[in-house]
Amino acid sequence: MVKGKKLISDFYELRVNQLMDKRVWDLPLVEEKEDVHHVLSILGGRNHIWVVKDKEGKELVGVITEHDVLSVLAPKNFPSYVFGMPDISSIKHGTAKTAEDVMCHKIIDCKPDDKILDALTKMVKYELRRLPVVSDKKLVGELTLHQLIRKYYAATQYHPMVEDEEG
Amino acid sequence: MPTEIFSVLLLVALALIFARILGYLFDRLKQPAVVGEIIAGIFLGGVVLAVFSGQILVFYDYKLSLPQLDFTSNEFVLLAEIGILFLLFISGLETRISKLKKMGRTSSFVAVGGIMFPLAFGVFSGLSFGFSSQESIVIGLILVATSVGVTVRTLMDLHVLDTDVGTTVLGGAVIDDILGIILLAFVLGIESLMDAVWISVRIAVFFLIFLILGLRIIDKILDLGERIHLPKAFLSIALSILLIYSFFADRAGISGIIGAFIAGILIGQTVRSHKIANDVKTVGYGFFIPLFFVWVGASLWENAGDDPLSLAVIGVFSAVIIIVGIAGKIIGCGIGAKLAGMNSRESLQIGVGMIPRMELALIIVAAAISHEILTGEAAHQILVTTVLLTIVTALVAPFLIKATFKHS
């Protein structure tokens, strides 16, 4: 187990950009004004979508997960105390029209040169399975729990943790 | 042997049980649960206290002496006041500044019209019934804030949430809630015109220090809260911020509830807020907030005179205020909507949609009473009027809203 300890501490010290998925062109992306039905069509196959201002600049403005869609797909049931600004977006009532209406605005992200340890801590803290990798507000990749598990397991099987640049 | 403090426990338990049962019944009848909770308070404060307070019950050999049940005891009032703070804190947490900016011109016009007319009508009615000018301003203020809850549910039942009317009404209601809270800060402190200037300065300073400074450091404080690895330590820190803000707002002379609202907005802007929003609601909705509504209901019995003349006066005054409250919103919001370019039918629908008053009206009365702006008989009269106003508008508005949409 001593070896495992050494391995995991090496793993923690790696940088996000060494393990992240850099194929931005392959990530699920929509623009914020995109129709909600397009969002649904993507989410049928993916677990999440990153919402960007426009596909050119790739400025990240939100994220939509299955759970966000659940709250607009299910019938709205307001508690009888509604005070303040209730969330009224719903497919049934036609108040969820674009990606922007459905998405979660508050994004927890990480930077390319953050340590894997910090990324893992963030995932635990906010109960997330994936983090967008953002540099200068621009989406440059994503880091999923899936990848991290796969890479770590591969490392225990004597594969190199970091693939060659062309990976 | 039984300590004084503990006699409030029975009271709190009774309050929660009755509030929830009556609230549930009203909810089943598709009426706002809040009305049920207030009625629970009226029932408890009148009937139950009169019958059971201080009684000794004897079952065979076992004697149970009930304590003096008193909803105006310091302990109970404190819990109810914390309920108010929670209501405003939650309201602040759910307020998105970014969404507010998008509300647009029509909603602002509607909100402003819906404040000016009811305020003027209320003040005028108060003065003509012989209330002092400060009392009359409170009456006007009570007519200002629209309750979003009732309207949202009705618009949803009618499937018109996504229309221009729906979005305008919701936006207007949110804006006039916020403006109502700010106006309240003025009214609670103003005694003369000179005061108005002084109060504005204090509000400005308070906002400057606590909002701007808050935006910078609150994230760091919350961060500290997160590092404490004890269960729900983060919630404790957030609640402490709420209480500290309320305390300092109160000391600045602009009422603790404003501090609570600002604390809510500040924490609501941070990334971490969705982690605690549910916890805050659990504590607030589950414990403190029902106690506030029960307390409002029970307070109706306080200073209640039983001579028929004063009851008649209250009856007439309430009727006037209810009519003025309904007319004020229809006219004010209607004109606002019309000015912003909507057609007559839509303007009427918006005016009608803004009729319901609920939480903030009650909060305003409660705050005015606890700041001793309203005292004695006037306090009683205005409280009764406000409760009747909230109940009647909440029950009547859905029918009116449905009626205006039926023809279109």
Image (spheres, coloured by chain):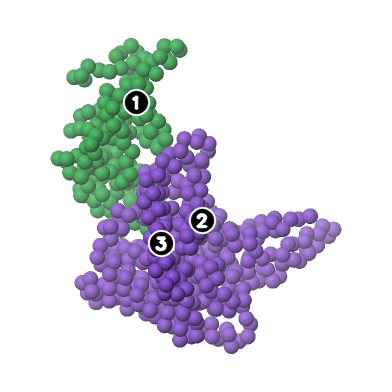
Q: CA distance from mark 3 to mark 1?
A: 46 Å
Relative horizontal placement of residue B377, taking residue A16 as reference (left or right): right
Identify which residue is drawn at 34% across, 13% down: A157
Please tell me whether mark 2 or mark 1 is closer to you in this view.
2
Provide the letter of the chain coloured green.
Answer: A
Label 2–label 3 contact, CB within 8 A = no
Residue B123: percent from the left, percent from the top?
42, 79
Provide the letter of the chain coloured purple.
Answer: B
On the question of residue B31 being in view, the answer is no
Please tell me whether mark 2 or mark 3 is closer to you in this view.
3
Residue B352: percent from the left, percent from the top?
34, 74
Label 3 resides on the chain identified as B
On the question of residue B74 being in view, the answer is yes
Identify which residue is drawn at 33% across, 26% down: A115
Using the rendered view, name the quadrant where residue B89 is placed: bottom left
- In this rendering, do the residues under marks 3 and 1 share a single chain? no
Using the rendered view, name the quadrant where residue A143 is placed: top left
Query: Could you classify mark 3 by the number of other residues whose Cα lies within 10 Å: few (under 14), some (14-19), or many (20 or more)?
Result: many
Label 2 resides on the chain identified as B
Three-letter amino acid code at the position of disc 3: Ile
Query: Could you classify mark 2 by the number of other residues whose Cα lies within 10 Å: few (under 14), some (14-19), or many (20 or more)?
Result: some
Residue ID for mark 2: B247
Q: CA distance from mark 2 to mark 3?
A: 14 Å
Residue A139: percent from the left, percent from the top?
23, 36
Label of residue B203 in the image: 3
